[in-house]
Amino acid sequence: MNVTLDPVTKALRPALANLAQFYQYDFSEIENGIVNLAGRFTYLDLSDLEKRLDEPGADAWLFRVTDTEWGHETLAGFAIALPAPEHPGGREIDEFFVMRRYRRLGIGRASADAILRASPGPWVVQGTRHNTGARDFWTRVISSIDTADHLTEHETPDVVYPAWTLQFSIS
């Protein structure tokens, strides 16, 4: 299945916020997230996204595919990349999501590969320690890029957000 990365313009931000609800639903299984009394997750809601995406150097993409079963274009996921303040000139994958229906079809790998290759230099990818699937995914993606080097991995034992961090460079 081919994937197209659509840069998120202001007009596409509501679509990104809608997909972020599914992302948070999936994450609630790992991080015990809850919805507000309106039945919505508040992390990555439209106002949060507006603040993030208005930051200098912020980028976001929607993953668009043609669903062969249904025969029309649809959204399969999204990614957000931000400057990595602790790595001058570096970028970080802030959020990355592929809807369950489109997982294990190469959409995530193709999207991640395209995003990383489009912005050479230092990169950081982090995730919660409980999300071992994401850690495995990113390790495979980074290892498959022939211009990726200096991959290091470490754990952050922070009490609030115990995480793993992958640092690498794309040339």
Image (cartoon, rainbow, N blue to C red):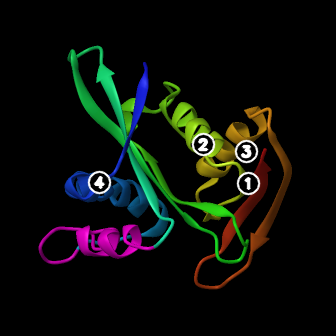
Disc 2/disc 3 C-alpha distance (Å)? 18 Å
Q: Residue furthest bottom?
A: 159
16 versus 75 height, above or below = below
Q: What is the C-alpha distance between the residues marked 2 and 4?
A: 18 Å
N-term-proximal mark, 4 vs 3:
4
Residue to which mark 1 is pinned: 121
How many marks overall?
4
| Disc 4 from disc 3: Cα separation | 29 Å
Image quarter in which the N terminus is found: top left
Q: Nearer the viewer, mark 4 or mark 3?
A: 4
What separation in Å lies between label 1 and label 2 (alpha carbons)?
10 Å
Question: Residue drawn 81% across and 66% down?
Answer: 154
Q: Mark 4 is on which residue type?
A: Thr
- Residue under numbered circle 4: 9
Circle 3 or circle 1, nearest the eye: 1
Split into 4 quadrants, where in the image is the C terminus? top right
Q: Amino acid at mark 2?
A: Ala
**Three-letter amino acid code at the position of disc 3:** Thr
Tell me if residue 105 is in the magenta stretch. Answer: no
Q: Residues within 10 Å of mark 1 (few under 14, many from 20)?
A: some
Q: Position of residue 32 (x, y in %)?
A: 42, 70
- The span picked out in magenta is 36-55
Tell me the residue that label 2 is attached to. 118
Q: Which residue is mark 3?
A: 139
